Image (cartoon, rainbow, N blue to C red):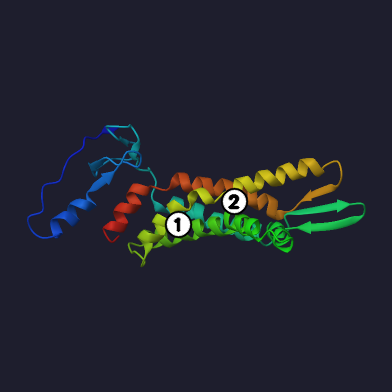
Amino acid sequence: MSPLTNKTPPPDAGGGTLLQEQAHSLLACPDCDLVFPLPCLSPGEKARCGRCGAVLMEPKSHGFDYSIALALTSLLLFVLSNTFPLLKLQIAGREQIGAIMTGVHALYDQGFWEIAFLVLLVTIIAPLFRIISVLYVLLPLWFGRRLVGAAHIFRWMEILRPWAMSEVFMLGILVAMVKLGDLATIQPGVALYSFAGLILFMAATDASLDDGAIWVRLEDGA
């Protein structure tokens, strides 16, 4: 663990170049906004804020390839989740097949377009944006390049992280299955298992991201 102390950069005496270089070597605490010099850490070490104790940087022992592999797996599971049936419901001789988009269509047809859009956002748009963003940012960095707008996309990816609530949708499915278990015969589909795997792999992708190393590579132009 590397404790850090706050340091104020010297005044700029030569235009804006010095301040820009110093800004790239500074790190702000995500909790209290205290500014520190960018630490140089080895895998396994952790830098904490000297004022509030928040974690500033924690380098991962693996490279970008681990996160890329998890993101590609998440993308495959996302496609399977939205391609195959989620559940097959049999009630009184009638059979109905449901998919992830079935609930969105039902809410929209009943006039609840606001709720339909919210469900679409948190179960499909936000998770897909996160997966694509990880690949858009990390794949070029893995080859030593940086695509246009990668820094902005990575920033938006962090902002939209709380909106990717696939696990809440999965919890709703499980609750519905328990309540309908005595009234109907429920057969889980391929999409249900794929969706459960998607939740796990997206969580693993988030845990594997080395935000500090990514920002350093983005600011240095890869």
Which mark is on residue 134? 1
Judged left or right of residue 174, residue 209 is left
Of the image marks 2 and 1, the number of the one nearer the N terminus? 1
| Rendered location of residue 154, percent (x, y) | 40, 56
Farthest front residue in view: 111
Q: Which residue is mark 2?
A: 198
Amino acid type at circle 2 is Leu
| Rendered location of residue 65, percent (x, y) | 43, 53
Q: Residue at x 35, y 59 (%)?
A: 151
Q: Tell me the quarter of the image containing the N terminus.
A: top left
Judged left or right of residue 70, residue 85 is right
| Rendered location of residue 204, percent (x, y) | 51, 45
Amino acid type at circle 1 is Val
Farthest right residue in view: 93
Farthest left residue in view: 13
Judged from the image, the secondary structure of the residue bearing numbered disc 2 is helix
Judged from the image, the secondary structure of the residue bearing numbered disc 1 is helix
Cβ–Cβ below 8 Å for labels 2 and 1? no
Which mark is on residue 51? none
Q: Tell me the quarter of the image containing the C terminus.
A: bottom left
